[in-house]
Image: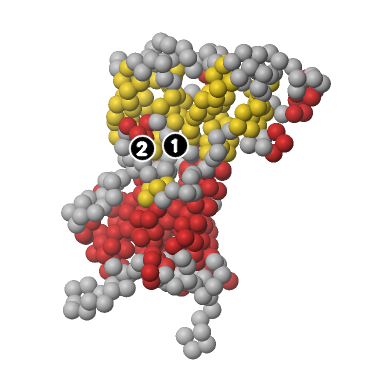
């Protein structure tokens, strides 16, 4: 589905009048696009379904690198290989300390990497080489009508489900509460795709989380006590 | 990647019933920005996603060194390539009554001694050396460019909406604030799975 189609579907679902001479809008095209992009961003982050491959140049004399500077839309590494296609295994700082007390200055063939936080990657040993990095990435935001979401096409409709409550945030209360089943469907799509990614990428260094283990019950209901009481107008 | 706070605020105004900053009725742009900064600060302390590194010039006879301004926690500290182990005052008191004056090649480090944002090496260094510290920090809240991954953009957006709607006043929507907080909690759990819990 294109951005235009998704936006139309979303605005139709929230009751925005389309195709008439009435020009008054409560939800604008821009708001709809922001909500769709937010849903796509969340989907890609929770499933790691988008992958990219890039080259990370490393040089002897340097053990630490900022991969996000070189590899666009970086989230985290999935697989790192050297120029001979040999796998470079993930490790922790403690493991490297146990392996080699001077690991931060040791030169040789790169054999391990440590990923710290979002944008700090250490290699052991130091060498001048090009590493091939397969990494999870964020999607490019939808901007033009013809843009197509990067996530798998079967989940494009789920973006509408995820965007509806984000649009309804400005109304809150009962209007938001009514849309939460859509968000539940959106999260179910995330769980489905994340499971598929875990099976597909079983040999990768990072996996998406199993949302089944999270307590999601409170995401799909609003506490009645927190909703504002309707005015005594019979409504 | 970086998230431009002003662009993010512009995308968030409609959820707060405004077309632009001049339409905001119950909040100021500064207050909304503060919600974003505070959310990022809190997240960075619970999930060490903002990793960084720096070098420290170790001077013979000097045991304490200032930590970076936005330092939250340390992943790893080494001197001339040799890793140091974290320690506590209690451990060192048990090890040696005179640990404060003992000088040799550093083997351990203590952070936050006396509540200060410093790291103290033990033993006291006897030669000049180069220290390397890998640490995690909180975002810079004086900048409108948030040096955070694109993937966390929605966390900030929800923090702004949730913070605004959770504030007391005529714009309050506690149910919106609560739901935003729950989705933020989900994002935080996912982030912790990728980047480790602090």
Label placed on residue B140: none
Q: Secondary structure at mark 2?
A: strand
Considering depth in this image, is B33 or A127 the residue closer to the camera? B33
Quarter assignment of residue B129: top right
Q: Can residue A193 be spotted in the picture?
A: no
Considering depth in this image, is B2 or A134 the residue closer to the camera? B2
Q: Which residue reaches farthest top?
A: A108
How many neighbours does mark 2 have within 10 angstroms: few (below 14), some (14-19), or many (20 or more)?
Answer: many
Q: Is residue A82 above or below residue A191?
A: above
Asked if labels 1 and 2 touch by Cβ distance under 8 angstroms, the answer is yes
Q: Give how far across and how far down residue A58 sits, in percent.
A: 35, 21
Q: Quadrant of the N terminus of chain B?
A: top left
Q: Earlier in the sequence, mark 2 or mark 1?
A: 2
Query: The numbered mark 2 sits on a residue in which chain?
Result: A
| A54 left or right of B105 in image | left
Q: Residue at x 75, y 29 (%)?
A: B89
């Amino acid at each position: 589905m294109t951005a235009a189609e998704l936006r139309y579907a979303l605005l139709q679902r929230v009751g925005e009048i389309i195709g008439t001479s009435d020009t008054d809008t409560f939800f604008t095209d821009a708001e709809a696009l922001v909500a769709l992009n937010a849903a796509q961003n969340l989907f890609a982050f929770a499933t790691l379904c988008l992958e990219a491959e890039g080259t990370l140049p490393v040089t002897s004399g340097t053990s630490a690198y900022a991969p996000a500077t070189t590899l666009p839309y970086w989230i985290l590494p999935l697989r790192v290989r050297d120029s001979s296609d040999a796998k470079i295994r993930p490790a922790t700082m403690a493991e490297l300390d146990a392996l080699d007390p001077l690991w931060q200055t040791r030169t040789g063939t790169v054999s391990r990497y440590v990923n710290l936080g979002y944008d700090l990657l250490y290699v052991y040993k130091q060498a001048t080489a090009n590493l091939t990095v397969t990494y999870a990435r964020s999607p490019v935001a939808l901007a033009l009508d013809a843009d197509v979401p990067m996530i798998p096409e079967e989940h494009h409709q789920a973006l509408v489900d995820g965007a509806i409550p984000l649009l309804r945030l400005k109304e809150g209360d009962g209007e938001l509460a009514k849309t939460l089943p859509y968000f539940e469907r959106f999260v179910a799509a995330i769980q489905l795709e994340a499971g598929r990614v875990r099976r597909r990428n079983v040999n990768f260094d990072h996996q998406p989380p199993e949302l089944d283990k999270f307590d999601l019950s409170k995401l799909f209901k609003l506490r009645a006590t927190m909703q504002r009481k309707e005015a005594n107008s019979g409504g | 990647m970086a998230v431009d706070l002003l662009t993010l605020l512009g995308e968030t105004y409609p959820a707060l019933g405004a077309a632009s900053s001049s339409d905001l009725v119950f909040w100021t742009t500064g207050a909304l920005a503060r919600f974003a900064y505070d959310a990022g600060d809190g997240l960075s302390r619970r999930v060490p996603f903002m990793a960084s590194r720096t070098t420290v010039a170790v001077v013979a006879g000097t045991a304490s060194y200032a930590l970076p301004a936005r330092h939250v926690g340390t992943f790893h500290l080494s001197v001339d390539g040799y890793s140091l182990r974290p320690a506590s005052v209690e451990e060192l008191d048990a090890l040696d009554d005179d640990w404060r004056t003992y000088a040799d090649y550093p083997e351990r480090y203590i952070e936050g001694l006396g509540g200060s944002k410093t790291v103290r090496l033990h033993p006291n260094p006897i030669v000049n050396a180069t220290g390397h510290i890998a640490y995690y920090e909180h975002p810079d809240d004086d900048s409108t460019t948030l040096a955070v991954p694109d993937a966390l953009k929605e966390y900030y957006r929800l923090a702004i909406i949730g913070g605004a709607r959770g504030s007391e006043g005529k714009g309050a929507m506690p149910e919106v604030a609560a739901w935003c907080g729950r989705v933020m909690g989900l994002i935080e759990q996912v982030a912790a799975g990728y980047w480790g819990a602090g």
